[in-house]
Amino acid sequence: MASVETSSSRPYHIIIFGASGFTGQYVVEEVARTVSEGPSGTLRWAVAGRSKAKLEKVLEQAAGALSKPELRTVDIIVSDVQEPDSLAAMCKQAVIVLNCVGPYRFYGEPVVKACVENGAHCLDISGEPQFLEGMQLNYHSEAAKKGVYIVGSCGFDSIPADMGVLYTRDQFRGRLTAVESFLTASAGPEGASIHDGTWQSAIYGVADGASLRSLRRKFKYQPLPVVGAKIKRRSALFYSNEVQQYAVPFMGTDPSVVKRTQRFLAEEQQESPVQYGAYAGVGGVGNIIKMLVAGMMFMLLIKFNFGRNLLIKYPEFFSFGFFTKAGPTKSQMKDSSFQFAFYGEGYTEGKDPSQGKPDGKIRTLVQGPEAGYVATPIAMVQAALTILNEPNALPRTGGVYTPGAAFGKTTLIDRLHKHGIQFSVK
């Protein structure tokens, strides 16, 4: 198994690929904060990307931001996603590659391929189901043979949701059968914004809907068994008493990731799967009007090449300023936070799920700092440290996994809790 044991022969525990990108720069800072949490209290790491000058600038900025002048001497590896030899050379030097190069639809597969072929684990922060499930279809068997762990969606999509469902299950006294999550976010006086890289991922994700359905048919899955009452799908827009605001179905990867985790648990570990519904609070009537207008333009334009190009070129206009090419400011990030509320139901200890309706309920929370560029680096780096420090708690063979499948038996939740992403029962 290519786990932490390989670190004696590989110079770096972690290489951050795409370190000069918008998210990558914050992953660099988070790794720098956590070097003492590496194996034996130290972490050997490097940054990688196409431009040495840009990588030097990122290290310079991190050194200033964290008052750690030693960051200026972190090793730099020049590697280009379009040059397979350079990717292979990078992967051979790492125990884990943190892939921050998106959109993953275009740039993700070469990195996964290079990691599998050269024995490096790979974590990404993709929110694109087409990419994530395509990697499972194409590389799971080979990764399993090599003892390599490929774990997608290790950022805000979808560690809080996936690990949150497992946490809710573990806190419930009995058999949990269904969970609904409600995501809400808060911002300070300057509001909130998201870098347009996430916007591009959403565009490609929605545009790929038909090919995603085709991809899923190739798995030839049997339907998961339904235990207890079947979860009811809510309408496209409704007032949620749970979060006291209007809500819509969550459009991100969380539902597909959670379902893949539950399938893994049912098929590989013979555990009872949990049904899942995901929703997001959107606030009051004013926000609904903006969302409906933006949504109609989005769904109309996404059908055509020229429309997708317009959406990509003018993210601020088509999202009412929510997605921007500049991304959020430091003060916007400082004042923002997220909360997932999980409402679960099931059968208490001693009750037979085949007899009658669920008789137990539970509410849990996952709360954390700004989702995209504070919580995401924390989640990604703690996932990597979990692989380095707890190889024996991972699935017994390598493969392409969801966070819940990879980390369900580890201390990842405790690690996240210590770094400001908190799990609690209410």
Image (spheres, rainbow, N blue to C red):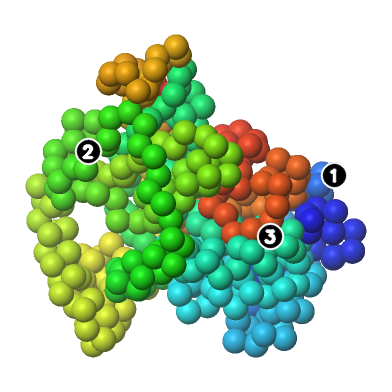
- Identify which residue, 34 or 271, lies in the foreground: 271
Compared across the picture, whether 345 is left or right of 134 comes to left
Regarding mark 2 in the picture, which secondary structure is present there?
loop
Regarding mark 1 in the picture, which secondary structure is present there?
helix
- Amino acid carrying label 1: it is Ser
Residue receiving disc 1: 40
In primary-sequence order, the first of circles 3 and 1 is 1
Residue located 43% across and 56% down the image: 221
Compared across the picture, whether 202 is left or right of 393 comes to left
In primary-sequence order, the first of circles 2 and 1 is 1
Compared across the picture, whether 155 is left or right of 310 comes to right
Residue 120: image x %, image y %? 73, 65
Q: Quadrant of residue 135?
A: bottom right
- Amino acid carrying label 2: it is Lys
Q: In the rendered view of the protein, which quadrant contains the C terminus?
A: top left
Residue receiving disc 3: 144
Which of the numbered marks, if any, corresponds to residue 232? 2
Look at the image and tell me whether residue 314 can be seen.
no
